[in-house]
Image (cartoon, rainbow, N blue to C red):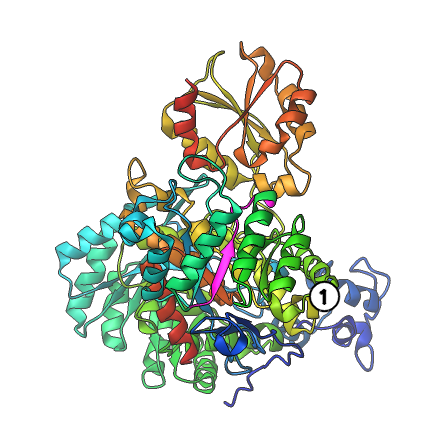
Amino acid sequence: MPVEIPKEKWTGKVRLVTLGATAAEGGTRTRRVTVGGGTTLPFLFFEGDMPHKPVIGIEIRDRKPDDWSPLLGLAWGEAMNDPGDWAKAAEQAGADAIVLAFNLADADGKAPTAAHAKATVRKVLQATGLPVIVNGPGQADLDNELLVAAAEEGAGERLVLGLCEDRNYRTIVAAALGHGHLVQARTAMDVNLAKQLNILITDMQLPLDRVLMDPTTGALGYGIEYGYSVMERLRIAALQGDSMTQCPMIVTPGEEAWKAKESKVGEGVPKAWGDWQERAINWELVTASSLVESGADIVVLRHPESVKRVHAMIDAMMAG
Amino acid sequence: MALSGIEIYKLLPGGLKPPHPKANCKECGFPTCLAFAMKLAAKQAELASCQYVSEEAQEKLAAAAAPPIRLIKVSSNGHEVAAGNETVMYRHEKTFFHPAGVFVRINDSDGLDAIRELVSTADEYKVNYVGMDLAVDGFAIKSTGDAATFSAGVEAVRGATKRPLILISADAAVMEAGLKAAGDSKSLICGASPENWEAMAALAKSHKAPLTVGGSTLDEMAELTDKIKAAGVEDMVLNPVVTTLPEALGVWTQLRRLALRKTFRPLGYPIIAFPSQFSADSQIAAVQAIAKYAGFIVLDRFNPADLYPLLVFRQNIYTDPQKPIQVSPGLYEINNPGPDSPVMVTTNFSITYFSVSNEVEGSGRKGWLLVADAEGMSVLTAWAAGKFDAERIAKTVKSTGIESKVNHRRLTIPGHVAVLSGELEDELPGWEIKVGPREAVNLPQYLKLME
């Protein structure tokens, strides 16, 4: 019995966005990463293309964070004490891009300065040839100060500056425009908020091929279904031709999953949770792999083992 | 595909040519057959209200009303797993209804004692997630080829669990021995292939058990389900041969679309997935199976560190997007608090509530937890949406009567909304506002420092 396979006839496609600039483009990166270009939902090769595979960013910090799970400390060891060493270790662990995130305070509890941001960005750029994404600590004023400094220091490198939110987009977009960078446009799990921020960014003349949408996700067990569905909706809107949703998506399953008690804590938890290390990595893995299936173009992870397994998944998918 | 009102009308007494003597008789309670047809199409009336519909028309109407993906149940001893009857491709369109049944696979050659031990452990397994107990749904027993071994294996499993079973063998004689050992439970027979379908269909029919139908192409499977249906078996589960992650994703997506968009009956059945067959990383494969349409999932091993995240993921994906899981706003007592115990406030999103209450409870410290009506949103989302502001928190403090239960006036708010402190002190004169940690996991440490 011949069965006719129903295929979607999408009219839109995801924009191509390239991170990192090599010497030829005025930067010093040895590798660039291009994401996007999909003409159907992820990996449905029977009806469309996915010219660029989803990639993995590994999150490193400007200094060893005080509140990360001890399992992450075990995984990265001494490298965590220096952002340059950490970037190198992340590259070796299979990162396609390095996500340098600043802590809210230095070891003495003081806020990091612009000079510190510049020195750290320089160190990371020298340690790795991968594209670099720079994230502030998540407080609008401090983010502005650090990200503007980072943008100046990395001029021409096609860094990604984040988080670019509705409360600080003016400063971040201006810094991206001034120094040849991209922005990570973060909104709170809502299709319309994501579109609205892209409109505001476009109004400032930053072209959409320099915008990554970050629709926010929750961890497994802590609201992943919201992030999962918002990403599906954004991608469907993009394929239906809505231009303000056609940017590639970046999400941070590593950060979210490693906040969960299931990953963070090994003692005094129910026996039914199973082995701590296995469970913790599974928490990040399940969060990340499901988001790759719902449309993520860049997933930011923390543990090298999850990186290895998500890479294997993506490779298997792309061999499709 | 559902029939339109006009299509239904043509099958009713008034719509026949020539009209039936009882055309527009009004006995159904509607003024005309056309009006009744419209109500039927809108699912606001029952066909049974009309005495005069021909048998042929009844069959047509019933067939059109059948769900595009047949609901298949396996059951035993009061446990039941149902799959199918889904209506959407994406959960945001409505919701996914029947969470995939998660089964743990046993080989009949594993040794009877080992089988009993593993099955008992997995059967007793349960894990609490936001107030719900999550568990394994059943067990699959795979034959290595010998009827006596299979029968003994199934018996051993049956003795250790009351949950539903999936019996796996390509040999009808072996399957028959297994079905006998499974007793009067309704097990899933796995299953029929182009080679053995006649004998398997006969077993499914005589045991009134659902049957999986395997095939390496959709064409082959569609042909087979038709033949099996003609042999008198209605309850089937599709078991497409898939060997890679993207192939599984593609085939399952096509099956769901054929059923929902084309009402293609020959493939309108739930899907069974064996994660280890199409990926070296069976955890990732199982995640895909849960999100992308499997109705039954057979895991190769029982490992709590794999299972807990999978069961939580299934719970999350099958949560109704229109109804965030909430707890009632109000005052919650943790570990029998007294007048000097701390007072904390959070939102009524159930994941938030359980994260906070579990931490306080686990710390062994006493506390009063105020749960504000934030319309089921988490702290940050509710704050951004204006549903967790100083006014709402103050209202919660005043309406719960906490002021008469404690001898102090200190309120701890979540670290994420530290910015509300000033405004809250204005709204709640006499109260001192303390900023707690951002994440619930740091509450025990915070409470310890507070003492």
Magenta span includes A139: yes
In this rendered view, identify the residue nearer to me: B358 or B42: B358
Q: How many marks?
A: 1
User: Is residue A93 among what the camera can see?
Assistant: yes
B67 up-or-down from B423: above or below: below
- Per the rendered image, the range of residues in magenta is A130-140
List the residue tagged with mark 1: A205
Point out the image quarter for the C terminus of chain B.
Answer: top left
Q: Give the x, y percent position of residue A143.
A: 57, 48
Q: Horizontally, is B347 left or right of B230 in the view?
A: right
Q: Give the x, y percent position of residue A229.
A: 57, 59
In this rendered view, identify the residue nearer to me: A220 or B84: A220
Q: Amino acid at mark 1?
A: Gln
Magenta span includes B448: no
User: Is residue B65 among what the camera can see?
Assistant: no
Q: Horizontally, is B174 left or right of B289 in the view?
A: left
Q: For the residue labelled by badge 1, is the local secondary structure a helix, a strand or a loop?
A: loop
Count residues near mark 1 (Cα–Cα under 10 Å), then give few for <14, some for 14-19, many for 20+.
few
Q: Give the x, y percent position of residue A148.
A: 58, 53
Residue at 56% x, 43% y: name it. Answer: B325
Q: Give the x, y percent position of residue B126.
A: 34, 44
Q: Residue pushed farthest right?
A: B31
In this rendered view, identify the residue nearer to me: B315 or B360: B360
Kindly indicate the quadrant of the structure image that contains residue A130: bottom left
In this rendered view, identify the residue nearer to me: B134 or A296: A296
Residue at 31% x, 39% y: name it. Answer: A270
B201 up-or-down from B349: above or below: below
